[in-house]
Image (cartoon, rainbow, N blue to C red):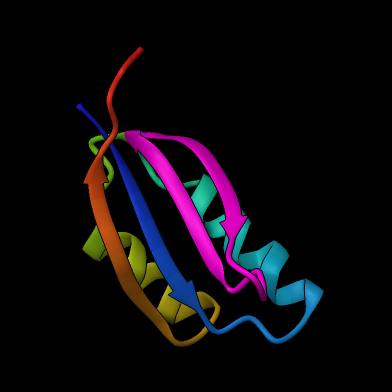
């Protein structure tokens, strides 16, 4: 079942946003990556079998402070 993971990532510049999206897109099982929120500081990842904790650790290592906001199942249409 696909999961929707929303993570708050410390992104202060456009380069940081690009890097965060690239890191998230290369994770295994990811189908969609995008930005959410008023200040565009939240990364949304949708995919099958995505490990939220491993993804958060990878983002912390390569971009900066990251925290998992929500993890929810996505209803298939």
Provide residue 9's location: percent of width, then percent of height: 50, 77
On screen, residue 73 above or below 64:
above
Q: Is residue 38 magenta?
A: yes
Looking at the image, the residue that sits furthest to the right is 14
Task: Tell me what residue is drawn at x 63 percent, y 81 percent.
Answer: 11
On screen, residue 10 above or below 33:
below
Quadrant for the C terminus, please. Answer: top left
Looking at the image, the residue that sits furthest to the front is 38
On screen, residue 33 above or below 49:
below
Task: Tell me what residue is drawn at x 50 percent, y 85 percent.
Answer: 64
Task: Tell me what residue is drawn at x 53 percent, y 58 percent.
Answer: 23
Task: Tell me what residue is drawn at x 45 percent, y 87 percent.
Answer: 65
Q: Image check: 12 left or right of 24?
A: right
In this figure, what is the number of numbered marks?
0
Provide residue 22's location: percent of width, then percent of height: 61, 54
Q: Quadrant of residue 13?
A: bottom right
Q: Which residues are magenta?
A: 29-47
The secondary structure that dominates the magenta segment is strand
Provide residue 40's location: percent of width, then percent of height: 65, 69
């Amino acid at each position: 079942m696909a999961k929707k993971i929303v993570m708050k990532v410390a992104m202060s510049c456009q380069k940081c946003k690009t890097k965060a999206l690239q890191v998230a897109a290369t994770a295994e099982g990811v189908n969609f990556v995008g930005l959410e929120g008023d200040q565009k500081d939240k990364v949304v990842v949708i995919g099958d079998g995505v490990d939220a904790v491993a993804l958060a650790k990878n983002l912390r290592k390569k971009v900066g402070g990251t925290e998992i906001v929500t993890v929810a199942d996505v209803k298939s249409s």
